[in-house]
Amino acid sequence: QKVVELQQGLADLCLLKLASHRADLESRAQKLAQHEAEFDRKAEEMDCVHAARDKALECREKDLERRVEDVVQRELAVAAKEEALDQALLRREMDSERRAEDLAQREMAL
């Protein structure tokens, strides 16, 4: 009888320890699940942040490309105006020289 009681007490103690271990494991599993959920949430946030940053960089790159193209077009326009002004100045100089020659010939003819 005593042996049976001791065995029963030992079995009860083992069951209590087992229940305690199970509760501890369950608690750890819940904490792990919470950490995993938090990690997943942060990873998703980081993905959103990176996607937004990538989109902003892409927009900035396109804006810079447009600005560069605008500057190139302005430089071409300025170069064309300079060329036109140079040509006009050359024509004026040639016209002035012709007029001076014509005037000199008229004066000599008189």
Image (cartoon, rainbow, N blue to C red):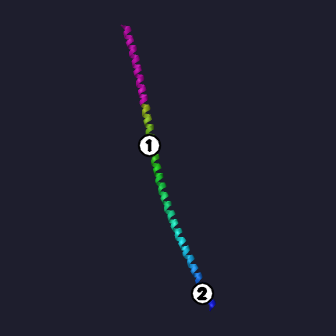
Q: Is residue 78 left or right of residue 21?
A: left
Q: Residue at x 40, y 16 (%)?
A: 98
Mark 1, secondary structure of its residue: helix
Amino acid type of the residue that numbered disc 1 sits on in the rendered structure: Arg
| Three-letter code for the amino acid on which mark 2 is drawn | Gln
Q: Which of these two is toward me, 29 or 53?
A: 29
Where is residue 26 shown, x and y percent of the image? 54, 73
Q: Relative to 28, is 108 above or below?
A: above
Q: Which residues are magenta?
A: 81-110
Furthest residue in direction bottom, as rendered: 1
Nearer the observer, 10 or 86:
10
* Residue found at the far left of this picture: 110
Answer few, some or many: residues within 10 Å of disc 1's Cα (few below 14, many 20 plus, some between 14 and 19). few
State the residue position of label 1: 66
Q: Position of residue 37 (x, y in %)?
A: 50, 65
To which quarter of the image does residue 13 belong?
Answer: bottom right
**Which quadrant: the N terminus?**
bottom right
Say whether residue 42 is magenta.
no
Mark 2 — residue?
8
Identify the mark nearer the N-term, 1 or 2: 2
Residue visible at 39% across and 18% down? 96
- Image point 41% across, 20% down: which residue? 93
Horizontally, residue 24 falls left or right of residue 78, namely: right
> Does residue 62 lie above or below 76 as drawn?
below
Q: Main secondary structure of the magenta part?
A: helix
Q: Is residue 108 above or below residue 23?
A: above
Q: How many discs appear?
A: 2
In front of the other: 86 or 38: 38
